[in-house]
Image (cartoon, rainbow, N blue to C red):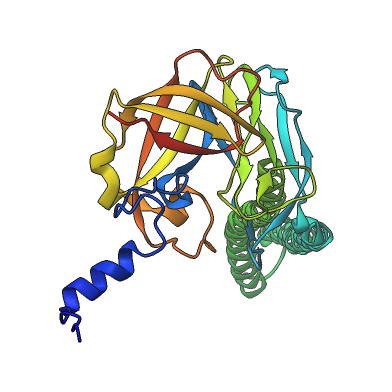
């Protein structure tokens, strides 16, 4: 009886790996199509543009403090619109209007209080002026009595002289009180004017904050919409926008570039001059591009993509810019893209 030779563990494993292979060769089957993890993600961006951001979502004046996590985007200039410096690019809802009536009431009250205080101080001054006139008349009368000293007794004449001195003293004292009161009145009027001006400045602050919620163009250019990472689409009218969030780009020309993000551990795959293939989420067409810039320092993906809710948002990556070799066709800035490096 013939015995089968014993097989080693290595032979058994090798046989299991070769089992079912039509060609009988290990590793002869080609690898599956390119895996998603081999692609870099990013966005199309205007090559020569100024980034425009949402205003701070807060409002502060004396005695009033409001803050919101998001504000509604009420208006947004259309994609591709040519604008001039000073044109409105976006308008946001200004919830600070709740403070307008409160500020107006404070101004009216300050003006009324100031008017009342001025009237009181002027009345006090007018009273002192009248009192000084009465004292002046008494002094004049006393002077006339002194002139009669030849017709009256010595004692009576002495009394008239004393009365004249007292009257002159009262006139001088009244004049000094008037002088001091005039200074106090002027100071009070100046104080009330400053107080009213200070309260009125709250309205100036209100208008300053209100104007900030109308975003205007810093220079002439072409409006380019951007991708809203939180919504998973382009930014549009009606979105809730956080303070400091990028809302659009103001391009100086129509040229767009690919801006994508390379994790730190894969940076060796990309360098300036590397050729990459770019596809948008809206089209499977590949566009060739050449890497022209790699940022010096890595940053968190949540910052680069402007999406704090990104699952791997704390991963560090480098922002890379690539210029299209034959143009990006009709693809517009803001579209989400996938990028792969061509084999060297």
Give the percent coordinates (x, y) of residue 235. Answer: 69, 43
x 59%, y 55%: residue: 187
x 56%, y 14%: residue: 253
Q: Is residue 264 above or below residue 167?
A: above
User: In front: 341, or 160?
Assistant: 341
User: In front: 157, or 71?
Assistant: 71
x 26%, y 52%: residue: 265
Image-based side of 291 in relation to 123, left or right: left
Q: In which quarter of the image is residue 10?
A: bottom left
Q: Can residue 116 be seen in this view?
A: no
User: In front: 228, or 271?
Assistant: 271
Give the percent coordinates (x, y) of residue 225. Answer: 66, 33
Q: Is residue 266 visible?
A: yes
Q: Looking at the rendering, in which quadrant would you find the N terminus?
A: bottom left
Give the percent coordinates (x, y) of residue 301. Answer: 42, 53
x 70%, y 50%: residue: 206
């Amino acid at each position: 009886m013939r015995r089968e030779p014993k097989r080693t563990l290595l032979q058994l494993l090798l046989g299991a790996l070769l089992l079912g292979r039509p060609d009988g060769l290990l590793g002869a089957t080609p690898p599956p199509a390119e895996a998603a993890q081999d692609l870099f993600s990013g966005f199309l961006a205007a090559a020569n543009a100024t980034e425009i951001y949402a205003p701070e979502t807060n409002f502060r004046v004396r005695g009033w403090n409001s803050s919101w996590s998001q504000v509604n985007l009420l208006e947004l200039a259309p994609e591709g619109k040519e604008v001039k410096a000073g044109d409105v690019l976006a308008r946001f809802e200004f919830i600070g209007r709740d403070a307008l009536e409160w500020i107006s009431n404070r101004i009216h009250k300050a003006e009324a209080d100031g008017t009342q205080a001025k009237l009181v101080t002027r009345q006090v001054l007018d009273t002192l002026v009248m009192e000084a006139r009465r004292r002046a008349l008494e002094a004049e009368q006393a002077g006339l009595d002194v002139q009669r000293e030849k017709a009256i007794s010595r004692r009576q004449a002495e009394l008239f002289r004393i009365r004249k001195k007292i009257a002159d003293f009262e006139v001088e004292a009244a004049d000094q009180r008037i002088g001091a009161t005039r200074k106090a009145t002027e100071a009070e009027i100046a104080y009330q004017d400053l107080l009213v001006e200070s309260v009125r400045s709250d309205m100036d602050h209100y208008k300053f904050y209100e104007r900030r919620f109308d975003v205007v163009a810093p220079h002439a250019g072409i409006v380019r919409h951007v991708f809203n990472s939180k919504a998973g689409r382009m930014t549009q009218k009606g979105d809730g926008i956080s303070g400091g969030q990028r809302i659009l780009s103001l391009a100086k020309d129509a040229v767009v570039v690919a801006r994508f993000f390379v994790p730190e551990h894969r940076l060796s795959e990309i360098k300036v001059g590397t050729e990459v293939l770019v596809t948008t989420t809206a089209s499977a067409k590949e566009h060739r591009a050449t890497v022209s810039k790699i940022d010096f320092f890595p940053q968190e993906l949540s910052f680069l993509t402007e999406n704090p809710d990104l699952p791997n948002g704390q991963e560090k990556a480098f922002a890379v810019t690539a210029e299209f070799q034959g143009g990006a066709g009709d693809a517009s800035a803001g579209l989400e893209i996938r990028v792969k490096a061509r084999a060297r």
